[in-house]
Amino acid sequence: MEEYRLVLDKNIGSHWKIKIACPRCLRKKRFTRYIDTYTFEYLGDDIGICDRINECGYHLPPSGNMNLNREALPPNVKPFIQKYIDQDILKASLTYYENNNLFQWLQFTGEADKLCRRFSIGTSSDGRTVFWPINKYGKICQPKLIKYKPDGHRDKGLSPTVPKGFSMDSGYKPCLFGEQYLDKDKTVMLVESEKTVLIGHCFHPEYTWVATGGANGFTVEKASVLKGYKVVVLLDGDEAGQKGAARTIERLKSFNIKCVNVTLFPDSDKDIADYYYDLDSLKVDAPNIIELHPALQSLQAKNPLVKDLVERLGLEVVNISKH
């Protein structure tokens, strides 16, 4: 009979030092994984327990059955209970767009106001963009503040933050951005940034665009929401984006979700938003249908929408992997 134990002591060697971000609450170096007692191999990145189980409640034992109920927790410890945000708080931020650099940059689409209303994009008192993720049940989840420059790029001198009072410790956590518009009749385009969701929907509303919130932001709970959907993973082409894409694919596969990974801009930090803005700046239309890449031929029969995406973007397919 197989035996398992938690990686908790130095007797296991170097393994005891290696902890990862919890797939539920995203806290770094808080997740302790189970290993095989005999081989000392991890049973999976999601199989383990959060060190802050009193706040998060995540525990996935080797059996594969998620234990998130009260009985699975230590005595006198309550599981994490999600809080949601009042609609009035969201509505109060949907203003002062003259101070919002992202809104001003979106003017090139001709649909800035429409996009910001549809996806509940707000403005903070200091001019940062407020993204309000809404889950599939219409509940408002943990918001995010991002500072953009006039050119539409994120100001990397100021990291994205969570507004005061809406942290995990206060009972709030994020969901997929754009989740409220999931439609079983549409292929899901899974991207990193919220800005890409806005641009993607603007130019290709025939798909449902959702954002992970970053290359490392795709949690188990976010993945579970996509069960039953066809998913195209369109994470960034740089090293961080591709590593994130690999983790994202594995997480989707754990839920038996049909997915394909398409790298539109390999070895580059360019994204779909940059692509369409550059076309607008040059006053040219997107190129016409390109020759079908050989790697897409077998995939086309199973998911013709992937070919359609590549054709509409007018891009050359460089890297495609099927899962």
Image: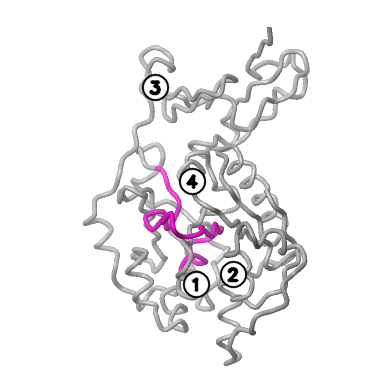
250 or 267, nearer to the observer: 250
Mark 2 and mark 4 residues within 8 Å of each other at the beta carbon: no
Query: Disc 1 residue type?
Result: His
- Residue range corresponding to the magenta coloring: 173-198
User: Badge 3 is on which residue?
Assistant: 69
First of labels 2, 4 by sequence position? 4
Q: Quadrant of the N terminus?
A: top right
User: Badge 2 is on which residue?
Assistant: 309
Task: Tell me the SS state at disc 3.
Answer: loop
Cα separation, mark 2 vs mark 4, equals 20 Å
First of labels 3, 2 by sequence position? 3
Cα separation, mark 1 vs mark 2, equals 8 Å
User: Badge 1 is on which residue?
Assistant: 204
First of labels 1, 3 by sequence position? 3
Query: Dot 2: within a 10 Å radius of its alpha carbon, few (fewer than 14), some, or many (20 or more) residues?
Result: some
Mark 1 and mark 2 residues within 8 Å of each other at the beta carbon: yes
- Residue at 45% x, 70% y: name it: 205
First of labels 1, 2 by sequence position? 1
- Residue at 39% x, 36% y: name it: 169
274 or 188, nearer to the observer: 188
Mark 4 and mark 1 residues within 8 Å of each other at the beta carbon: no
In the drawing, what numbered circle is on residue 239? none
Locate residue 301: give its quadrant: bottom right
Mark 3 and mark 2 residues within 8 Å of each other at the beta carbon: no
Cα separation, mark 1 vs mark 3, equals 41 Å
User: Badge 4 is on which residue?
Assistant: 228
Query: Dot 4: within a 10 Å radius of its alpha carbon, few (fewer than 14), some, or many (20 or more) residues?
Result: few
